[in-house]
Amino acid sequence: MPTSDIDFLNLLTDIIQKQIVILGRDVVLRKARSIGKITIDDTGAVTAVEGEAKVYLKSLIVSLAEISPESIRKTIEPMVSGNPELQALISHLQVEGKEDAAPTAQVPVVSPTSK
């Protein structure tokens, strides 16, 4: 279970790199880089975030779920199994009928720059 910013940075990197394999590098990097002040190299490794990494993690999950919620759920569920807060976020990414459907639940996205 991630507990520190370093753990969350590593989890961010793992998620991004797994999604690159599934959805494609350009799409995933564009989405991931659009969530705020986050630095991601071309391999998908997160090298820096400005603010709390946990906030970026939640925003990343929601942002990537806009593309493929089922892919996100299947990829991330095992990675967040020890974190009830992140598990709850994943559980809201329900799909109705097809994989490219939008999430049915509205999950609030917290801006990484707000406090």
Image: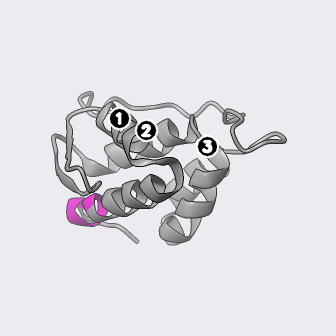
Residue type indicated by callout 2: Val
Of the numbered discs 3 and 1, the one sitting upstream in the chain is 1
Q: Is 5 above or below relative to 98?
A: below
The residue at which mark 1 appears reads as: 30
Determine whether, in the image, residue 90 is placed left or right of residue 12: right
Q: Which residues are magenta?
A: 5-9
Q: Residues within 10 Å of mark 3 (few under 14, many from 20)?
A: many
Residue in front for this viewpoint, 70 or 26: 26
Question: How many discs mark residues in the rendered view?
Answer: 3
Magenta span includes 76: no
Q: Secondary structure at mark 2?
A: helix
Residue 56, percent across and down? 33, 43
Determine whether, in the image, residue 44 is placed left or right of residue 85: left
Between circles 2 and 3, the one closer to the viewer is 2
Q: Residues within 10 Å of mark 2 (few under 14, many from 20)?
A: few
Residue type indicated by callout 1: Arg
Q: Residues within 10 Å of mark 1 (few under 14, many from 20)?
A: few
Find out whether the residues at labels 2 and 3 contact each other: C-beta distance under 8 Å.
no
The residue at which mark 2 appears reads as: 27
Residue type indicated by callout 3: Ser
